[in-house]
Amino acid sequence: MSQFPAPHFSPPDDQSGAPRRLISPQERFAASETEPPTEPENPFEAQISARRRDEMERRHLPPRERARQERARLKLENVSRESSSQNSNVENAPRRRAAPSSSHQQRARAERHFTQNARETAPLGVAKRRRVPKWLKRLSGLVALILLGLIGYAAFTAPQFGIASVDIRGIAATPQDELRPLARRLIGQNVLRFQGEEVARAARLLPTVESAQVVRLAQWPPKVALQISERAPVLKVGAGRDWWVVDPKGVPFRRSNPGDAALYRVVAPQFAPELGRPLDPKLWARARALTTAIETDNRFASAATQSENARFWQLRRIYFDRDGLASLRFDRAPHRETLVRLGDDAWPAKLARARQSLAYFERTGRKASELDLVSLERPVWTQRIVQTTAKPAPDAG
């Protein structure tokens, strides 16, 4: 059996009955040059196919959403129809004859708007956020505001929010008996509106207290803490057995006790220490500068001797005369009786020179009653005379 198609005979060229001839497959299946051109595509058919495609895309919508969009489309069509009817009354006749095409365009626009809304809608299975009415939003806000006001009123007035206890923190030299009455003022007050500043102000009036504040603690029942920052002792000021401990600001805040043995003692005729009353600012600044220079020289001496606990300047007292000239008295042998005069300037250099001179006296066995370094370029020292009593020789006769 042949695989080629059956032969095809061409029609006769004329009506004379001439024999027909065979044509090739290329001639048979090729497009005829004399074939009339195809008619242009109908625009209404393209619009109908677009509507069908939009309808297929809308099928994923839930029934409620589809009904809502259908109502919106009908409403838009009604508005378009009313606008077209109003325009037809005022337009001329040729425009009225063109009304059907205009209505068709409006319907097409309505359908496009409907399709666009459908495409923006979430697909099936995705929860869509429903629009809440304005009156419901306002009512919800009013209810929330009322509840918030009730909660705030209860928090500021309920006895459950009263302070149950007060902690006193940061005290070492301040007696607790002086702070407990202040702390008891806070017991029972509301933790959200207690009068903590009044208690802190009263605590700051105590001589040993530098600053105070009341802070809330994250505990239940409600609890607060009275945080105290005490004055730091730096020097002792006074004379004889009456010594006061002074803070860095020059305020005497308590009497000296055995625990203050490491503090240097400063004596000056201008100092008249009283509890809570600041000392003379100018002279106090000079005293602080001299003690700072002494501590610095102690560190140099410790580094030179490789002993961290060594303290070269172990002083009985630091003395300022009426002219403001400084002098030092030692508290240990062999220089216990030596007076070191430093003057009123260049204290770091004079302390280093005094330390070298005293070390020289120790090596040579000399005894100095006074080392005058008021003039650093021309130091002077005075030898101490050691008195000895000689016993009389026995009578030989």
Image (spheres, grey):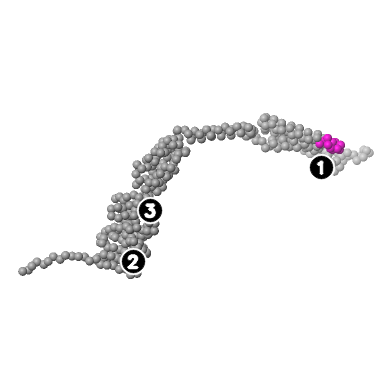
- Under mark 3, the amino acid is Pro
Instruction: Give the dominant element type of the magenta stretch: helix, strand or loop.
Output: helix
* Residue linked to disc 1: 30
* Residue linked to disc 2: 374
Q: Secondary structure at mark 2?
A: loop
Q: Nearer the viewer, mark 1 or mark 3?
A: 3
- Under mark 1, the amino acid is Ala
Quadrant for residue 375, please give it: bottom left
Residue lying furthest bottom in this view?
Answer: 378
Q: Is residue 57 magenta?
A: no
Q: Mark 1 and mark 2 in contact (Cβ < 8 Å)?
A: no
Residue 86, given in percent of the width and then of the height, sits at: 80, 35
Q: Is residue 53 visible?
A: no
Q: Is residue 91 magenta?
A: yes
Q: Secondary structure at mark 1?
A: loop
Q: Nearer the viewer, mark 2 or mark 1?
A: 2
- Under mark 2, the amino acid is Val
Q: Residue at x 38, y 46 (%)?
A: 206
Q: Residue at x 11, y 67 (%)?
A: 393
Q: Residue at x 73, y 32 (%)?
A: 75
Residue stretch rendered in magenta on the structure: 87-98
Quadrant in which the N terminus appears: top right
Seen from the viewer's position, the closer of residues 64 and 154 is: 154
Residue 278: numbered disc: 3
Q: Is residue 316 visible?
A: yes
Label 1 CA crowd tier, 10 Å (few <14, some 14–19, many 20+): few
Q: Mark 3 and mark 2 in contact (Cβ < 8 Å)?
A: no
